[in-house]
Amino acid sequence: MSDGLPLGAFFLLGGVLMFFDRAMLAMGNILFICGLALMIGLQKTVLFFTRRPKLKGTAAFTSGIVLILLRWPVIGFLVELYGIFILFGDFFATIGNFAGNIPVVGPYIQKALFRASEASGGRRNAELPV
């Protein structure tokens, strides 16, 4: 697969751990987008970010990147995080189901996910990027 996506997540985490270092957050954003494009293809990436239901998340994600570059890293990161939840929120259920199969902690994760899905109405993988 692509090394850009995990590397982007590493730089984002490093930027947060280093008290919202602007350079690391910007590098993480660039590598995250490049890794996503390398993983699913450039055309599917553009189509995913420009879908009508995903435009709100795309605007928030892009605004977060701009705020980080304009030296507002904490607010930019929070806006960007909101955009990520809007864009990839449907995919979190798939990740949670995968995490539910982890030995020892898996049953606890499944219980938490079951309670969360009951509370939210149970939306399931409506529009994944692939």
Image: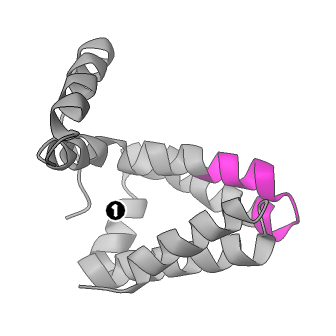
118 up-or-down from 75: above or below: above
Residue extent of the magenta highlight: 67-80
Residue 35's x, y, as percent?
40, 80
Identity of the residue drawn at 31% across and 85% down:
2
Residue 32 visible? The answer is: yes
Residue 75's x, y, as percent?
78, 48
Q: Quadrant of residue 125?
A: top left
Q: Residues within 10 Å of mark 1 (few under 14, many from 20)?
A: some
Q: Indicate left or right for 85 with 60 as reference.
A: left
Is 78 covered by the magenta stretch? yes
Q: Residue furthest front?
A: 104
Residue 104's x, y, as percent?
17, 41
Q: Which residue is mark 1?
A: 48
Identity of the residue drawn at 38% across and 43% down:
53
Residues 115 and 82: in front is 115
Q: Residue furthest top?
A: 119
61 up-or-down from 45: above or below: above
Quadrant of the drawing holding the N terminus: bottom left
Q: Indicate left or right for 69 with 1 as reference.
A: right
Residues 33 and 3: in front is 3
Residues 92 and 87: in front is 92
Quadrant of the drawing holding the C terminus: bottom left
Residues 78 and 50: in front is 78
Q: What is the chief secondary structure element of the magenta stretch?
A: helix
Residue 41 visible? The answer is: no
Identity of the residue drawn at 34% across and 62% down:
48
Residue 91's x, y, as percent?
27, 48
Q: Secondary structure at mark 1?
A: helix
1 up-or-down from 94: above or below: below
36 up-or-down from 123: above or below: below
